[in-house]
Image (tube, rainbow, N blue to C red):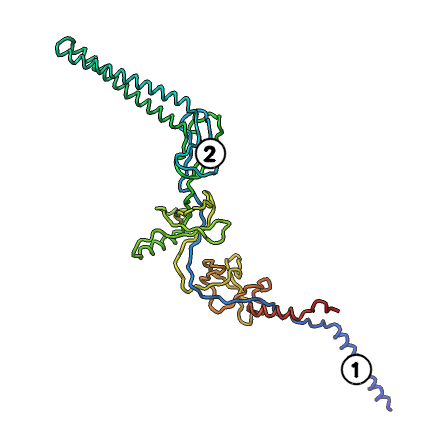
Amino acid sequence: MPSKLIKGLAIIIGLAAVMLVVLKIKSNLTPPQMPQMPAPRVTTSLPIRKSVSSFHEFTGSTEATQSIDIRARIAGYLQDIKFVGNTDVKKGDVLFTIEPDSYQAKRDRAYANLKSAEAELLRNQKDLERMEKAVKSNSVSKQTVSTVRSQRDQAQSAVLASKASLAEAELELGYTKVCAPIDGRVSRHFVDSGNLIGSSGNTLLARIVDIDSVYVYFKVNERILLRRLKERAKESEDKSDVEVFIGLTDEDGHPHKGRIDYVDNRVDPETGTVDVRAIVPNPDKVILPGMFVRINAPNGTNDNALLVEEKALGTDFNGKYLLVVGEKNIVQPRPVVIGELIDGMRVIHKGLNDGEAYIVSGLQFARPGMPVTPMTREQMAAAAKGAGKMGPKPGKDK
């Protein structure tokens, strides 16, 4: 074989070997392709249309319809306390006794002075009658008659003063028994027996509140007030007794029903609100003065409200939003304007359209701009059931 041919074959074989080595090195340097992760599964739902009654939501506080401070109206030693704190009392029940003996003696002395003044008046009246007969026969002078008449008039004044003193003494004697002025629930006593009270003012002894009904005070935005006034102007009959529904902090919903009985006659220019008061029956006496309450005031009926599940809503610096599954199953954030909460469903006033699927669960896996695998609740349940059947059965593991 010619040497040139042999030499050419050697070069070709060498180049082929070099190419094999290069391809091997390149294949070792190229990273393996990672399998693409499937889009996360999320549960979606569609908004529903429903007729709902809308409400304005407020917060407020309670006050007693009547609250009376029981104070000492006389000075003396507190002799007896005749009630137990935080119990119901009736009008006229005796609550305290304040040193009645000394005031009884003062009353008896005033009565005796009255009787003495009445006796003196009777004597002066008879003397005047005698003088008036005697002057007719010139037995006494007219000056003497005038003197006796003046004494009679002074005796009359003394009787009137004695009657006033007796009335005052009887009034003070009545104050020795401090009675409940209304039906209600009495507080604890603020002063113990044996203390001197009333010497430096009308000492506060206790407090009675009537909580068979309670007042609820809250503030209403002037826009809501104006809207209500315009609606009332269109109504053919006065509907001033607007119903409201009240809920305590530990209660679900608003189980207590009341009515608005007072609206202030001015709007606070600093807050743009007006004070409103509702009266709420409280037969079980579970609502106490000073409590924080939630108020729902009816605002008409929306026959075509759009509702979504409350748990699907998120909150950011711009307010409330929903995560909507858009084209190609891409997650889109959707700012919304919300309304009332009704049985776990939230009214959406703006931001969502009919037929747009929003994410209910799996929100932790959904990111705006990323794809997801949307599934209904039924599909998600079926997938979970199928995954359970595919798993190993107990006792079959090897």
Q: As rendered, which of 380 and 127 lies closer to the eye?
A: 127
Q: Nearer the viewer, residue 274 or 150?
A: 150
**Numbered mark located on residue 83 in the image:** 2
**Residue 162 visible in image:** yes
Sort mark 1 into few (<14), some (14-19) or many (20+) by Cα contacts within 10 Å: few
Which quadrant would residue 363 be assigned to in this image?
bottom right
Nearer the camera: disc 1 or disc 2: 2
Q: Earlier in the sequence, mark 1 or mark 2?
A: 1
Alpha carbon separation for disc pair 1 and 2: 114 Å
- Please provide percent x and percent y for residue 221: 40, 51
The amino acid sitting under disc 1 is Ala
Percent from the top left, x then y, of residue 383?
61, 70
Name the element at disc 2. loop
Amino acid identity at mark 2: Phe
Residue picked out by circle 1: 16
Asked if marks 1 and 2 touch (Cβ < 8 Å), the reply is: no
Q: Would residue 16 appear left or right of 73 to someone viewing this image?
A: right
Within 10 Å of disc 2 (Cα), the crowding (few <14, some 14-19, many 20+) is some
Residue 257 vertical placement versus 175 (above, below): below
Q: Which mark is residue 220?
A: none
- Quadrant of image for the N terminus: bottom right
In the displayed structure, does residue 112 sit left or right of residue 398? left
Q: Quadrant of the C terminus?
A: bottom right
Residue at (35% x, 19% y) in the render: 109
Q: Is residue 339 left or right of residue 112?
A: right
Of 262 and 36, the residue lying toward us: 262
Residue 397 image position (x, y, % from top left)? 73, 68
Q: Residue at x 35, y 25 (%)?
A: 170
Image-quadrant location for residue 149: top left
Task: Determine which quarter of the picture holds residue 49.
Answer: bottom left
Relative to 82, does residue 149 appear above or below in the rendering?
above
